[in-house]
Image (cartoon, rainbow, N blue to C red):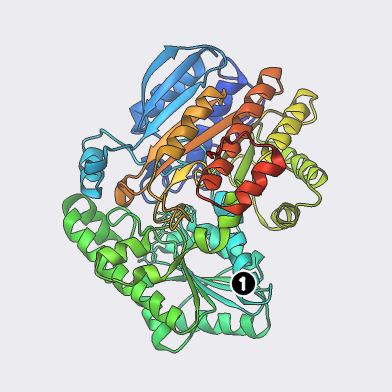
Amino acid sequence: MPSSNPRHPNFPIPGGHELRAKGWRQEGLLRLLENVLAVGENPDQLIVYAALGKAARNWAAHEKIVETLKAMDEDQTLLMQSGKPIGLMKTHAKAPLVIMANCNIVGQWAKAEVFYELEKKGLIAWGGLTAGAWQYIGSQGVIQGTYEIFMRIAEQRFGGSLAGRFILTAGLGGMGGAQPLAGRMAGAAILCIDIDAERAKKRKEIGYLEEIAPDLDTALQMIERAVAQKRATSIGLVGNAAELYPEIYARGVVPDIVTDQTSAHDLVHGYIPKGMSLAEVKRLRSEGQGQLMAASRASIVDHVRAMLAFQASGSEVFDNGNLIRTQAREGGVDNAFDIKIFTEAYLRPLFARAIGPFRWMALSGDPADIGKIDDAVLEMFPDNKIVTNWIALARQHVPFEGLPARIAWLGHGERTALALRVNDMVRKGELAGPIAFSRDHLDAGAMAHPNIMTERMKDGSDAIADWPLLDAMLLCSSQADLVVVHSGGGGYAGYMTSAGVTLVADGTDAADERLTLSLTNDTGLGVMRYADAGYVESLDEIARKNIPHLPLG
Ligand code: NAD
């Protein structure tokens, strides 16, 4: 039975044992589509996260997708073009059930203005990576990544601990909402600014944010007290970061760590310029896009100048994947890229081994399944400190949103081994129902994004999109259940290309084959992508794990 959803009563959380489709593969994908809306930011508009990241093009498309998933056979493949179902082709039972191309615009035309025009005409949709691919699992999806970033900074700069350290950030939306919990889990005192009081309230209600301060003075006092007591805490503050960052700097307060996760990638539907009310911004979204883009960019300039000033005063400052530096540079801040990107600064050695954000969802809706899989992870990887530490912390601190789910950074071989173990647990009836596996698009072989994932690659191959395209084709050849190729829309126009994958472990032998081929090949390609760029960690991984790489000469 689906369960009620207090946040969005019209979008129940899927679950139960009753099949509405012809098999668990189709039913699983249907439940994941329902789940991204249930945990999304604005499901009435089909918006899941990242400003405009949509689950389907429009409601007619959504209905057709649901109808098709329910009716289709295992030897058919549903074709999706930017959130719209196009056709149902006869393929074979080992082919993907769904293949998607989301928001891909030909190079010279891949600009924000072109995207907004196409979007207005109803010809395209921005899938926000995991929204359009029905893989989003709420703020939990990025939480380990955010936590790992904070812990790498702790190791690199603060003797391994963030106790008594102050993190300043902004953005409490779908993804940014993970920051307060990740900061607190890392032991820090974290202040999170958001212009939208509703967003702050939501994060508090779901247990990601502890308190909301009434004003800046109180917020800074609360942080100061927590820092002095070396007490972990998360404080929200409603206001515009483009005003508050410079104000905090002007007061001589220097946080230990500064970042930002407002929707700066989208100057129209995401970022809110200073001095404007949310109502005014909503009006300009339809009637004055040019004016809004200029105002957003001008605010981002001030926002990033304050971040640079914090950096010059000794704060550890980084871009958290929202293109804020890119927007600022285009607005005239020539040194915006003095701020580092989190991937290169903290996580690249993990990506070079294809260790990245792997995740699983209990399709029955039974949280006990996640507990049993947690136990299996701890038993299978006792020496993997990143994972064992994370599972222990996540069990204690991370509440479920929507379908019970877990994320853990696992690498080549590990993902396959875990998925096979889980498929066996499903087969033996040890779990309440099938489990779906997916991962973030920000994964080793899966993303070319020269301002985020692949910035300053060793060999300069930052902008080459062949890798995610190869990844998607390989996943189709490897029997994955859902495969997506995605490129930048909105402010992301032309900025990136990525590949996504979903698999349903339904306890069958066929699932064993799909999981083995897809997960092994996905991470295998990821290691090769970094080996090709000359990363020693990847060459080591290839040798240790016998990855069938074909080096030249
Ligand atoms: P979202 O649209 O759900 O939330 C953005 C939040 O920013 C909103 O709550 C909004 O009110 C707030 N905001 C906008 N302008 C503001 C301003 N000037 N001052 C204060 N608050 C402001 O977006 P999201 O899903 O949370 O994603 C945030 C950003 O992070 C996006 O750019 C997204 O693409 C990026 N992102 C990065 C990663 C990563 O791997 N690091 C992952 C996912 C998303």
Q: Residue at x 22, y 59 (%)?
A: 292
The answer to which of 494 and 296 lies nearer the viewer is 494
Q: In this picture, is 312 found above or below 295?
A: below
> Where does the image place residue 173, in percent across and percent down from the top left?
46, 56
Q: Nearer the viewer, residue 91 or 28?
A: 91
The answer to whether residue 341 is seen in the rendering is yes
Look at the image and tell me whether residue 206 can be seen.
no
Residue 516 on image: x %, y %: 66, 28
Q: Amino acid at mark 1?
A: Gln
Quarter that holds the N terminus: top right
403, 228: nearer the viewer: 228
Q: Say which quarter of the image contains residue 380.
A: top right
Q: Residue 278, located in which quarter of the rendered image?
A: bottom left
Quadrant location, ligand no. 1: bottom left
Estimate the x, y position of residue 284 in percent, counting from the top left.
21, 56
Above or below: residue 542 compared with residue 206: above
**Residue at label 1?**
156
